[in-house]
Amino acid sequence: MKRYKYIFAGLITSVFLTTGCSDSFLEVESKTQETVDTYFTTDEHIQEAVVAAYDPLHWPDWAMSQYNPVQIMSDIMADDIWVGGADKNDNQYWHLMMNYEALPTNTMTGLWTVAYSGVKRSNDVLTYIGWAGENLTEENATYYEAQVRVLRVFYYNWLWKFWGNIPYYEQNLTAPYIAEQFSADEVYNKMIVDLEGAIALDVLPMKASSENYGRVTKAMAYMLYAEIVMYQNDESRYAKALQYMQEIINSAQYALVDDYAAIFKESGEWSSESIFEVNYKDDNAARSWNSPLVAGGTVLPRLISPSGWADGTDGHDNGWGFCPVRTETYERYSNNDIRRGATCWDAVSVGSYNPRYQDTGLFLEKYVAKTGDNKDQIADADLNYNNNLRVYRFSETLLNAAELIVRGAGSGDAKEYLNRVHKRAGLTVEVAATLDNIIEERHLEFAGEGKRYWDLIRTGKAASVLVPDSYGYRTNAWSESKKYLPIPQSEIDAAQGTLTQNNY
């Protein structure tokens, strides 16, 4: 049972929910009959608003009538997993994304709405801080500001990577709720300046105390900085990104755990390796199909487990057969790489199930449904598995540092950083610190964690790797014109001619 304090969805229900950058807001009357501008003037109430800004982190797996688990939505466009399900019409927009043929009328819309909800709530907090005046200490005001500015960049990072050319705003919209659209490069510049400003406030701890697991930390902000800078290939900021990675390494507050497989168990949550996770719980979890945005667990394990499986067999539960792991992914690992078994669960060898579309017999062990992981929920079992989503791990810090050094960002022992990760996997022969070796190590280390697709794009490998397969599943090749998803048509329509559609 998890005993640390959670930053969870649903802890404040009087905060506004936005359904997109161009839609009106849902006004909810306070039980105290106070207006928003009088309610959010105390430290206690602004803390509630800060918690509300974290809420959308938990929503993407199922919200706005779509399954959009963030790491899966990128991984299906890469080369480690298939989409699966019943057939090509089951979560059809996933299959279209996998084949680089998403349509404005049939694409991922839920994540767009969730991300802008996060932006809106983050902006709210900054407004409320101004209202509070002397009711809020300078120390607390600065701490709250730093958290929500980092969160705002985190939400924009989702939007920027998937859609590129997006509306961007740092003050909430007023009627008719239309924001200026910026190019992807302009969005990058705005995000990175905002993040640099949040880091410069210098109030975030390097590592959270146990009662604050799930809150933004300096290390999390540093990792977000490196991710954005490296994806943009912004060489002017490589040195700063490397400095941040080495600060994390030299802080001695994070370390690789010995057992790679243990990272993804409940007992492995918030280990010494964990820099940032999104918390999910099953203890009294009340998330339901009628109320999916309240506190609780995640549906991801149910989505990606074998259909027709007998609950409890081999310690696993039944699922819906999405996201089977490709056979080629399993074969990429050497026999003595402990990450293979921790990543690829060979269900065929231990039980029986109903094979679904694109079945390989292999499932993503990191997040599959484990027996007992939703036993303490009180609503809908499907939605309340307690698997935390791992976002940033210390192994990525080491590999980021190694890559930045190889790219000329500064001094340091890139080979030592790389081989710490390599040897933890049980591989005793050292590898040279080349860019290709580092990217391959990332591939093996983070399979199923939502890193691969973006790595292929930023390193220029996508066009040669993401090509039609021999099975006839992916018939189109990735190209620069497919870098961004089409903006949902509903948003184009609501923007009254102010949004330009991406190429698709």
Image (tube, helix red, strand yellow):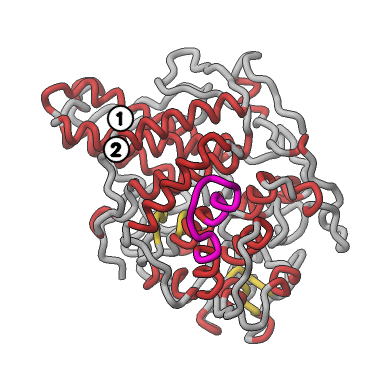
Question: Residue 333: percent from the left, percent from the top?
Answer: 67, 74
* Type of amino acid at the residue the image marks with label 2: Val
Q: Which residue is mark 2?
A: 50
Return the residue nearer the eye: 112 or 432: 432
Q: Is residue 10 left or right of residue 461?
A: left
How far from the left and from the top, in percent, is residue 473?
A: 82, 57
Residue at 70% across, 24% down: 501
Task: Give the extent of the magenta segment.
Answer: 402-416
Give the amino acid at mark 1: Val
Vertical order, 149 against 67 (above or below): above
Residue drawn at point x = 49 percent, y = 45 percent: 226
**Mark closest to the chain's N terminus, 2 or 1:** 2
The reply to whether discs 2 and 1 touch (Cβ–Cβ < 8 Å) is yes
Whether residue 69 is visible here, answered yes or no, is: no
Q: Nearer the viewer, residue 65 or 54?
A: 54
Q: Is residue 160 above or below residue 96?
A: above
Instruction: Give the spatial CA distance, label 2 vs label 1.
Output: 6 Å
The residue that disc 1 covers is 125
Q: Secondary structure at mark 2?
A: helix
State yes or no: residue 221 in magenta: no
Please say if 333 is above or below 472.
below
Helix, strand or loop at mark 1: helix
Quarter of the picture holding the C terminus: top right
| Quadrant position of the N terminus in the picture | bottom left
Q: Which residue ends up furthest to the left in the rendered image?
A: 134
Residue 154 placement, left or right of 93: left
Judge from the rendering whether residue 247 lies leftward or rightward of residue 363; answer left or right. left
Q: How far across and how far down the image is residue 103, in percent?
A: 74, 36
| Circle 2 residues within 10 Å: few <14, some 14–19, many ≥20 | many
